[in-house]
Image: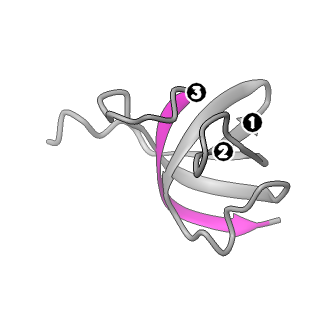
Amino acid sequence: MDPTKGKSVTLTGTVEAGVEHGCLVLNANGQVYSLFGGDRAVLVAGAQVEVTGHEAPNVMSFCQQGTPFQVETARAL
């Protein structure tokens, strides 16, 4: 088992531009997730989306906002 991979979950929310250039975050029910991976044609600021993936707390990033979330699938709502 990969110790860096958490339990797979599905989140629904609004994609927003992060505070750092090039970073995207998902606001899902008051929680903020920094998005990694996923289809950038779907994951754009302002989009309502459903993403499936897992929290990735060991990811190193310059985004510095929200809980790191590795996107496995994303679809627009």
Crowding around mark 1 (Cα neighbors within 10 Å: few <14, some 14 to 19, many 20+) is: some
Foreground mark, 2 or 3, reads 3
Prevalent SS, magenta region:
strand
Separation of marks 1 and 2 at Cα, in angstroms: 7 Å
- Specify the quadrant that holds the N terminus: top left
Foreground mark, 1 or 3, reads 3
* Residue 31 falls left or right of residue 54: right
Separation of marks 2 and 3 at Cα, in angstroms: 17 Å
- Reading the chain from its start, which is encountered first: label 1 or label 2? 2
Nearer to me, 12 or 41: 41
* Residue 5 falls left or right of residue 47: left
Which residue has dot 2 on it? 11
Which residue has dot 3 on it? 65
Q: Is residue 30 above or below residue 75?
A: above
Image coordinates for residue 20, horizontal then vertical, percent? 60, 38
- Reading the chain from its start, which is encountered first: label 2 or label 3? 2
- Reading the chain from its start, which is encountered first: label 1 or label 3? 1
Which residue has dot 1 on it? 28
Image coordinates for residue 31, horizontal then vertical, percent? 70, 25
Secondary structure under the numbered disc 2 in the rendered image: strand
Q: Are marks 2 and 3 in contact (CB under 8 Å)?
A: no
Q: Are marks 1 and 2 in contact (CB under 8 Å)?
A: yes
Q: Can you name the residue that lies furthest to the left here?
A: 1
Q: Which residues are magenta?
A: 66-76
Q: Quadrant of residue 41?
A: bottom right
Nearer to me, 48 or 52: 48
Which residue is found at the position 60% from the left and 35% from the top?
33
Image coordinates for residue 27, horizontal then vertical, percent? 75, 36
Residue 67 lies within the magenta run: yes
